[in-house]
Amino acid sequence: MLTRTFKKILVGIIGGVVVLAGLLMMPLPGPGVLVVFAGLAILATEFEWCRRLLRRLKAASRRMIQKVRSRIKKDRVESELKSSP
């Protein structure tokens, strides 16, 4: 049975390695952002600061996705208006 401290250290190491791997993947083709989020989710199982950070990042991601979707919709409407006679 793992003691609480040992589990916290183990989760910290594994989560840190996954976050670091995700950061290294950022300039390369691959799922860098998703791997960083996965590492933060691992860390959030044991660390409150990481839970708060993950919540903020999720909220910021949702806002950014919403902005991109509205921009795409706006661009489609503008292109349809330009193409109609």
Image (spheres, rainbow, N blue to C red):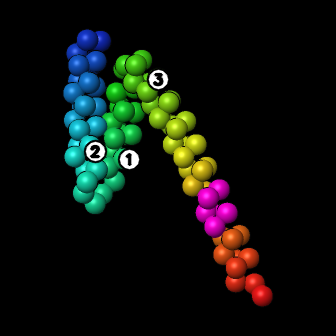
**What segment carries the magenta color?**
70-75
Q: Residue 28 location in percent, x, y?
A: 24, 57
Kind of residue at badge 2: Gly
Q: In the image, residue 2 lies at what x, y percent?
A: 25, 16
Q: Which of 85 and 57 is in front in this view?
A: 85
From the image, give the main secondary structure of the stretch colored magenta.
Answer: helix
Label 2: which secondary element: helix
The residue indicated by pointer 1 is 34
**Residue at numbered disc 3:** 52
Q: Which amino acid does label 1 sit on?
A: Leu
Nearest to the observer: residue 16 or residue 23:
23
| Residue 22 belongs to the span the image colors magenta | no
Q: Tell me which corner region of the image, top left, top right, bottom left or bottom right, holds residue 81.
A: bottom right
Q: For mark 2, what is the residue? A: 22
| Amino acid carrying mark 3 in the image | Arg
Quadrant for the N terminus in the image = top left
N-terminal of the pair, mark 2 or mark 1, is 2
Helix, strand or loop at mark 3: helix
The residue depicted at 28 percent of the width and 25 percent of the height is 11
Disc 3 residue crowd, few under 14, some 14–19, many 20+, Cα 10 Å: few
Q: Residue 1: tell me if it is visible.
A: no
Q: In this view, does 59 lie to the left or right of 25?
A: right
Q: Which of marks 3 and 1 precedes in the sequence?
A: 1
Q: Which of marks 2 and 3 is nearer the N terminus?
A: 2
Q: Do the residues labelled 2 and 1 touch (CB within 8 Å)?
A: yes
Say which residue appears at 42% left-offset and 17% top-offset. 48
The reply to whether callout 1 and callout 3 are in contact (CB within 8 Å) is no
Residue at 21% in and 27% down: 13
Q: Quadrant of the C terminus?
A: bottom right
